[in-house]
Image (cartoon, helix red, strand yellow):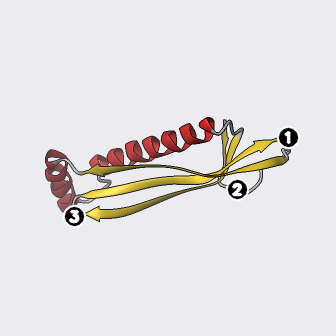
Amino acid sequence: MIAVTTDTIAGKDILHSLGLVRGSTVRAKHIGSDIVASLRNLVGGEVREYAQLLAGAREQAFDRMMEQARALDADAVVGLRFETSQIAQNASEVLAYGTAVRLG
């Protein structure tokens, strides 16, 4: 299945809009990763522990969104977006959303 951030897909016609599809996950920081990340903040550089946590959360949210699109028998998701919001001191939600469509 195709997933794009644009509202159209080059060379394809959108025949039907099937509606909003979304997937989300909430992740909390692990105390061990938090300690390592705090130490890394002292010396600078990428905080790999958080980057890996966020990458996994984005992937899970994307997969859940695509499951919804498949359930609608969609050919593609257009207008794909990601959002992240903090919902607690140590927990964040990652949301993937877009419009499920059938192509011609």
Q: Which label's residue is closer to the chain start, 1 or 3? A: 3
User: What is the quadrant of the N terminus in the image?
Assistant: top right
Residue 61 located left or right of residue 100: left
Residue at the spot x=14%, y=49% of the render?
31
Q: Amino acid at mark 3?
A: Gln
Q: Which marked residue is nearer to the observer: mark 2 or mark 1?
A: 1
Write down the residue under mark 2: 6
Rendering coords of residue 56 (x, y %): 39, 42
Residue 65 located left or right of residue 100: left
Q: Which label's residue is closer to the chain start, 2 or 3? A: 2
Report helix, strand or loop for mark 1: loop
Work out whether 63 lies above or below 34: above
Disc ID at residue 78: none
Contact flag, marks 2 and 1 (Cβ < 8 Å): no
Contact flag, marks 1 and 3 (Cβ < 8 Å): no
User: What is the quadrant of the C terminus in the image?
Assistant: top right
Q: Which marked residue is nearer to the observer: mark 1 or mark 3?
A: 1
Residue at the spot x=26%, y=60% of the render?
44
Rendering coords of residue 21 (x, y %): 58, 50
Q: Amino acid at mark 1?
A: Gly
Q: Which label's residue is closer to the chain start, 2 or 1? A: 2
Judge by depth and name the residue closer to the eye, 16 or 2: 16
Marks 1 and 3 sit apart, C-alpha to C-alpha, by 46 Å
Residue 23 located left or right of residue 103: left
Write down the residue under mark 3: 89
Marks 2 and 1 sit apart, C-alpha to C-alpha, by 17 Å
Marks 2 and 3 sit apart, C-alpha to C-alpha, by 33 Å
Write down the residue under mark 1: 104
Residue 93 located left or right of residue 6: left
Rendering coords of residue 10 (x, y %): 82, 48
Residue at the spot x=38%, y=63% of the render?
85
